[in-house]
């Protein structure tokens, strides 16, 4: 626990070593990133004797004060403690450093260096990160599947586009992998899809200290009590572990003298002045937390969109020996301006014979930093990116919807299109009947036959096929495969979906003809009201004549269920 506290307090410290006459400025975060990027140890010896903060760093690492690092003769490696996750801790450190503007004096007697993340990164990346030897990005995993990688399913409303993608998704991911689903709309943008900087609430340095016990220790250190009172309060917490180093921690926050005790509770013969003085000595090199610091702060942080989230997951998995598919599903892709939403990502959609992007694109600085944060390494290693062969982008499209955006030919040719016919998969609703109308207008109506009769009439009006009614225009909740249709639910849904769609869209110019059986054809509400009484007889005779009075009255469940 003490080690974690000391490590957190020292994360803003900046160090300097000499490398062939050139000063290399770095911080502990640089060491973490190097260790995460490669298995090689990090050499912090330099060519000259360590001085100032670097000497303090070597001493503290040699004493084992950083639980994430091992130190031996100038080289640093990561610990093998399964309870400590260096990658997660490094992300927290990087976030904290990005907010820090503290000026640290003490690298040498005359020098002042900013302790923010960029200050150390820019100076040390070439020294601490050997990008030429670290294969951080792997695009070709060898993942094999019969599914297309860039795929658009299109067809009339209700043909089962989303259902088909969901079914194929289950097949694709049956042995592992992940997916994310997004729905495009007219205001959807590149920033939504790929990512952008957004204001977020970021935990302060206090939250860098993770456990409750560590925060309890910090609360005592920040109290106005004397050093002796703080020692007595913390004694029980430290007596079974880091008791000899408790004076070092108190020395960071206080110059007062205090008596110490042994593990058995008896008074110690000495006053532990050496450890206490060590705490005072390293005080200039750490960012001490104060009670004045806010619990959280507003900061601008790169927030990835669904494309970038799926992309990062795919690249992380690509490094493993068993690659899995990662799927991004885009519903209603043409309801947004796809050229604007995809932006330069458009270029990545061209895939080679290995299903990797044929052409790379240049990345922005914010994407470089985000990828380096998530995948490790130097941001410059992500100057160009491609889509790996284990990432899939599937979409649905209905060109007949109102308010859709056109797709240009260049965009279309980068996708494999699958058309779902107007009667594909109708076998699952064949025979499903429901009672409509009252009195002399009462009929037992098979939904599939009514749907086909309406479609036939619409074709007479020269309505395009992509505006016809598909088998699943009414959902399975309304037309279940294995249960009778509930007439009340069916009638309510038929009015709100079928009649509204015909009135406002598909037959907007042919209302008088299509709803020939209605006395008032001018308003949607009047047509709905007459439907409750007349059933199919609100429609033109070409439709209503399909359901004569002699229609069977006992087939309520149908024989089309699987």
Image (cartoon, rainbow, N blue to C red):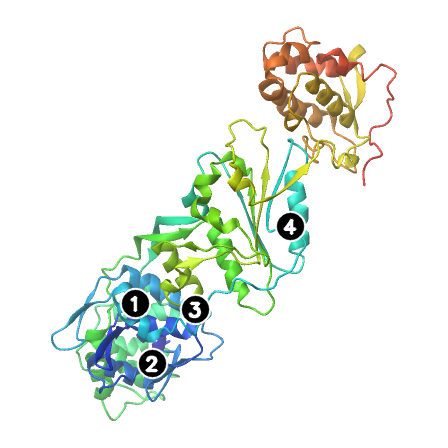
Label 4, secondary structure: give it: helix
Q: Is residue 338 or residue 294 the one in the foreground?
A: 338
Which labelled disc corresponds to residue 85? none
In the visual, does 293 lie left or right of 368? left
Residue matched to label 3: 87
Q: Is residue 334 or residue 251 the one in the foreground?
A: 334
Label 2, secondary structure: give it: loop
Label 3, secondary structure: give it: helix
The location of residue 457, given as percent across then percent down, is 71, 18
Instruction: Determine whether 487 is above or below 359 in the image.
Output: above
Task: Name which residue lies at 70% across and 26% down.
Answer: 490
Binning the other alpha carbons within 10 Å of mark 3 as few (below 14), some (14 to 19) or many (20 upward) gives some
Circle nearer the viewer, 3 or 1: 1
Binning the other alpha carbons within 10 Å of mark 1 as few (below 14), some (14 to 19) or many (20 upward) gives some
Alpha-carbon distance for marks 1 and 4? Answer: 41 Å
Residue matched to label 2: 65
Which numbered disc, 1 or 4, marks the residue that appears first in the sequence? 1
Circle nearer the viewer, 2 or 1: 1
Q: Do the residues labelled 3 and 1 touch (CB within 8 Å)?
A: no
Alpha-carbon distance for marks 3 and 2? Answer: 18 Å
Q: Is residue 332 or residue 552 the one in the foreground?
A: 332
Residue matched to label 1: 121
In the visual, does 531 lie left or right of 239? right
Alpha-carbon distance for marks 4 and 2? Answer: 49 Å
Q: Would residue 355 be seen by someone viewing this image from the given angle?
A: yes
Circle nearer the viewer, 3 or 2: 3
Instruction: Determine whether 139 is above or below 71 in the image.
Output: above
Residue matched to label 4: 169
Circle nearer the viewer, 4 or 2: 4
Q: Are marks 2 and 1 in contact (CB under 8 Å)?
A: no
């Amino acid at each position: 626990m003490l080690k974690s506290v000391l490590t957190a307090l020292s994360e803003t410290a900046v160090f300097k070593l000499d490398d062939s006459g050139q000063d290399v400025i770095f911080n502990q975060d640089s060491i973490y990133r190097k260790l995460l990027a490669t298995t090689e140890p990090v050499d912090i010896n330099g060519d000259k004797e360590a001085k100032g903060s670097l000497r303090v760093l070597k001493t503290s690492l040699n004493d084992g004060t950083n639980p994430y690092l091992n130190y031996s003769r100038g080289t640093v490696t990561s610990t093998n403690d399964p309870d400590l996750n260096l990658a997660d801790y490094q992300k927290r450190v990087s976030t904290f450093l990005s907010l820090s503007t503290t000026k640290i004096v003490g690298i040498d007697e005359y020098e002042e260096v900013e302790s923010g993340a960029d200050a150390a990164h820019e100076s040390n990346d070439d020294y601490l990160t050997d990008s030429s030897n670290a294969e951080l990005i792997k695009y070709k995993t060898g993942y094999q599947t019969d599914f297309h990688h860039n795929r658009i399913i299109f067809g009339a409303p209700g043909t089962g586009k989303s259902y088909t993608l969901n079914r194929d998704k289950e097949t694709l991911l049956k042995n592992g992998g992940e997916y994310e689903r997004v729905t495009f709309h007219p205001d959807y943008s590149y920033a939504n899809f790929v990512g952008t900087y957004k204001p977020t609430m970021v935990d302060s340095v206090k939250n860098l200290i993770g456990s409750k016990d560590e925060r309890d220790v910090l609360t005592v250190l920040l109290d106005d009590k004397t050093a002796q009172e703080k020692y007595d309060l913390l004694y029980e917490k430290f007596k079974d572990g880091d008791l000899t180093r408790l004076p070092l921690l108190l020395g960071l926050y206080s110059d007062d003298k205090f008596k110490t005790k042994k593990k058995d509770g008896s008074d110690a013969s000495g006053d532990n002045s050496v450890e206490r003085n060590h705490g005072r000595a390293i005080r200039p090199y750490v960012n001490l937390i104060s009670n004045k610091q806010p619990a959280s702060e507003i900061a601008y942080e790169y927030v990835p969109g669904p494309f970038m989230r799926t992309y990062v997951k795919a690249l992380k998995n690509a490094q493993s020996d068993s690659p899995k598919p990662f799927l991004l599903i885009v519903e209603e892709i043409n309801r947004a301006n796809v050229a604007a939403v995809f932006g330069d990502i458009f270029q990545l959609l061209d895939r080679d014979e290995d299903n990797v992007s044929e052409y790379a694109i240049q990345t922005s600085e914010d994407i470089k930093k985000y990828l380096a944060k998530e995948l490790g390494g130097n941001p410059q290693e992500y100057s160009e990116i491609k889509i790996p062969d284990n990432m899939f982008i599937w979409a649905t499209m209905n060109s007949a919807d109102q308010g859709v955006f056109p797709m240009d030919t260049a965009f279309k040719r980068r996708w494999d299109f699958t058309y779902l016919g107007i009667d594909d998969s109708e076998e699952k609703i064949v025979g499903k009947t429901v009672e409509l109308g009252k009195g002399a207008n009462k009929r037992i109506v098979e939904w599939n036959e009514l749907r086909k009769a309406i479609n036939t009439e619409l074709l007479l009006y020269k309505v395009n096929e992509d505006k016809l009614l598909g088998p699943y225009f009414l959902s399975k909740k309304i037309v279940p495969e294995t249960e009778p249709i509930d007439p009340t639910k069916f009638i309510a849904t038929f009015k709100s979906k079928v009649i509204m769609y015909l009135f406002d869209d598909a037959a907007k110019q042919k209302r008088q003809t299509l709803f020939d059986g209605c006395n008032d054809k001018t308003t949607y509400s009047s047509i709905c009201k007459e439907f409750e009484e007349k059933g199919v007889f609100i429609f033109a005779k070409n439709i209503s004549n399909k359901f004569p009075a002699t229609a069977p009255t006992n087939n309520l469940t149908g024989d089309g269920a699987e």
